[in-house]
Amino acid sequence: MRIESLIFAVTAVFLAVVTPIYWFMSNDPTGTTALTLSFGLGAMIAFYFMLLNRRIGARPEDREDGEVEELAGEYGFFSPHSWWPLMGGASAMVVFVGLVYAWFILIIGLALVAITVIGWVFEYYRGEHAH
């Protein structure tokens, strides 16, 4: 994670230097806002990767003597049959359509997003795959 955090830290420093220069030369609030938010995102990801590096240490792919076999094992749990991501995308689509066309569609979309988030979070609390 050290190399990844270094990449994002360099990007954040670059954006921190470029943003005020861009602001003084162009006086464009939209581009300045985009550059500022990009700096914040890069700094946040770099900080998170630095914390991960400190917590988990060097991974096999970070070491010169690392072997492929060291990466074997469980990577986590991934739901093989969930329909909630599809519902999340459809709900987000309704929200964005509501932002473009009408406020009542936005309210319907936000209600669908709330239902989708609740369903996705509690997916494995009931039914066949309950924990």
Image (tube, rainbow, N blue to C red):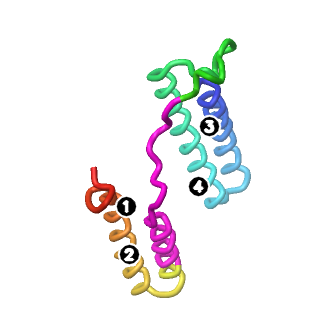
The numbered mark at residue 33 is 4
Q: Are marks 3 and 1 in contact (CB under 8 Å)?
A: no
The numbered mark at residue 112 is 2
Q: Could you tell me residue 37's position as x and y percent?
A: 56, 50
**Residue 76 falls within the magenta-colored stretch:** yes
First of labels 2, 4 by sequence position:
4
Q: Amino acid at mark 4?
A: Thr
Q: Are marks 1 and 2 in contact (CB under 8 Å)?
A: no
Q: Nearer the viewer, mark 2 or mark 3?
A: 2
Other residues around mark 3 within 10 Å, as few (<14) / some (14–19) / many (≥20): many
Q: Amino acid at mark 3?
A: Ala
Q: CA distance from mark 2 to mark 4?
A: 30 Å
First of labels 3, 1 by sequence position:
3
The numbered mark at residue 12 is 3
Q: Which element type, helix, strand or loop, lies under badge 2?
A: helix
Q: Residue furthest top?
A: 65
Q: CA distance from mark 1 to mark 4?
A: 33 Å
The numbered mark at residue 120 is 1
Please state, as top left, top right, bottom left or bottom right, where the N terminus lies in the image: top right
Q: Residue at x 72, y 55 (%)?
A: 26
Position of residue 108 relative to residue 129, above or below, is: below
Q: Nearer the viewer, mark 1 or mark 2?
A: 1
In this picture, residue 66 sits left or right of residue 56 = right
Q: Amino acid at mark 1?
A: Trp
Q: Residue at x 27, y 49 (%)?
A: 131
Q: Could you tell me residue 42's position as x and y percent?
A: 58, 40
Highlighted range, magenta? 73-96
In the foreground, 77 or 17: 77
Position of residue 21 relative to residue 72, above or below, is: below
Q: CA distance from mark 4 to mark 3?
A: 14 Å
Q: CA distance from mark 2 to mark 3?
A: 36 Å
